[in-house]
Image (tube, rainbow, N blue to C red):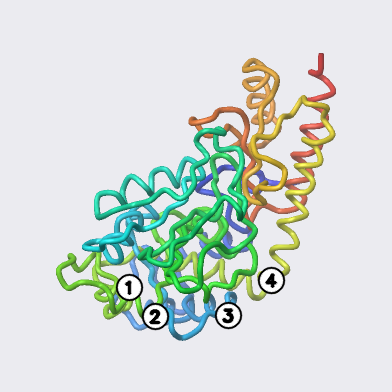
């Protein structure tokens, strides 16, 4: 029988692997090699320094990341990076940074960036209701931009880029919060990648930031230390008391990805299979389930869809909850249903949801 934890389709915080949950449960009482609860181990201990080092090395291995990048474990969520990036790369610049406005979260990024300097929205999906992403011929990147920023996967609308955007001579910055470590990625083509943990790689409370050394060197000494990449690098993510528990869970998840899953190619294969199951259900429902995003831009992390009316949405959510599922309510911005199928959401769980959707459709089709 599949547990309720394993049937958590929440948009975030998402499910954690069952093996990781078991290790976390034990660690809350006692980390074997320390003899203390993970909740009481000092952030200045040799043990925690080793945790940070191993987690960094695991991420480098999974992504094939060069030594030109620093890996930081910061607080403040991805929202803090909405400001840290332009504070570092845009403040005082003459030319506009280029941003893509592709959904709910990218819209929030643009608002924060404009506080620091000139911003050009290179493309916006607002006019089409954020149900598609731009084609290459709709994007005209400037060689003078301080950087390009985009969100790789829009969790609300279920949109995902399957290609790297921009110019090689302009720094790329990407919010990968909801698809980080879900598939292989040529991370070395970016200058900054950031991702809060609570989708694919851990619990809320820590944000992973991959920052190229050129960006670190560009950090102004006028910035507050907490918002300064250089100071965070110098302190090895230990400028202030870091979220020890959250970082430890990220370590356990990276071990799971390396040792149990066998790397990101295998993880991507499973994630594609899960997405294919759910999208096939939508496509074969004769309009009973109406997907939000255009077919070519569908996310492999978040499957957002509508039902014929709000009464059916409420009934779907109630009956799915009774069947053991959770987290299926669509984001408040668009409503409907959203099934988030992050890394730890297993293939059997996706199959169980697909079977539930099929039964629900047969019983409620008019």
Nearer the N terminus, badge 1 or badge 3? 3
Q: Residues within 10 Å of mark 3 (few under 14, many from 20)?
A: some
Mark nearer the viewer, 4 or 2: 4
Query: What residue is shown at x 44% (from left), y 77% (from top)?
Result: 51
Are the residues tagged 2 and 1 within 8 Å (C-beta)?
Answer: no
Q: Is residue 357 visible?
A: yes
Q: Which residue is under mark 1?
A: 237
Query: What residue is shown at x 80% (from left), y 25% (from top)?
Result: 361
Q: Which residue is under mark 3?
A: 64
Q: Which residue is under mark 2?
A: 47
Nearer the N terminus, badge 4 or badge 2? 2
What's the mark number on residue 260? 4
Q: Residues within 10 Å of mark 2 (few under 14, many from 20)?
A: some
Disc 4 to disc 2, C-alpha distance: 23 Å
The answer to whether 10 appears left or right of 203 in the picture is right
**Relative height, residue 299 to residue 176 (above, below):** above
Q: Residues within 10 Å of mark 4 (few under 14, many from 20)?
A: few
Disc 1 to disc 3, C-alpha distance: 21 Å
């Amino acid at each position: 029988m599949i547990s309720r934890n394993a049937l958590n389709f929440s948009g975030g915080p998402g499910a954690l692997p069952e093996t990781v949950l078991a290790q976390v449960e034990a660690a809350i009482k006692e980390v074997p090699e320390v003899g203390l609860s993970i909740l009481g181990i000092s952030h200045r201990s040799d043990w925690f320094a080793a945790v940070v080092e191993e987690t960094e090395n695991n991420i480098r291995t999974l992504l094939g990341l060069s030594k030109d990048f620093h890996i930081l474990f910061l607080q403040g969520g991805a929202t803090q990076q909405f400001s840290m990036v332009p504070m570092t790369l845009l403040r005082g610049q003459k030319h506009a940074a280029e941003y893509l406005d592709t959904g709910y979260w990218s819209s929030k990024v643009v608002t924060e960036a404009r506080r620091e300097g000139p911003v050009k929205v290179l493309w916006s999906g607002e006019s089409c209701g954020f149900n598609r992403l731009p084609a290459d011929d709709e994007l005209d990147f400037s060689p003078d931009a301080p950087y390009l920023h985009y969100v790789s996967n829009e969790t609300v609308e279920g949109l995902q880029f399957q290609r790297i955007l921009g110019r090689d001579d302009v720094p790329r910055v990407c919010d990968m919060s909801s698809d980080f470590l879900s598939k292989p990625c040529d991370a070395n083509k970016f200058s900054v990648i950031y991702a809060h943990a609570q989708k694919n790689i851990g619990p809320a409370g820590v944000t992973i930031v991959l920052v190229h050394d050129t960006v670190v060197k560009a950090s102004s000494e006028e910035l507050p230390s907490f918002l300064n990449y250089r100071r965070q690098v110098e302190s090895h993510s230990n400028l202030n008391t870091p979220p020890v528990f959250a970082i430890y869970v990220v370590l356990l998840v990276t071990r799971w990805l390396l040792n149990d899953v066998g790397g990101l190619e295998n993880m991507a294969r499973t994630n594609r299979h899960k997405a294919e199951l759910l999208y096939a259900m939508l496509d074969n429902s004769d309009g009973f389930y109406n997907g939000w995003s255009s077919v070519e831009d569908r996310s492999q992390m978040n499957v957002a869809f509508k039902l014929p009316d709000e009464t059916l949405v409420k009934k779907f959510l109630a009956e799915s909850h009774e069947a053991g599922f959770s987290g299926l309510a669509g984001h408040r911005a668009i409503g409907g249903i959203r099934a988030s199928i992050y890394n730890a959401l297993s293939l059997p769980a996706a199959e169980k949801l697909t079977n539930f959707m099929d039964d629900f459709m047969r019983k409620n089709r008019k």
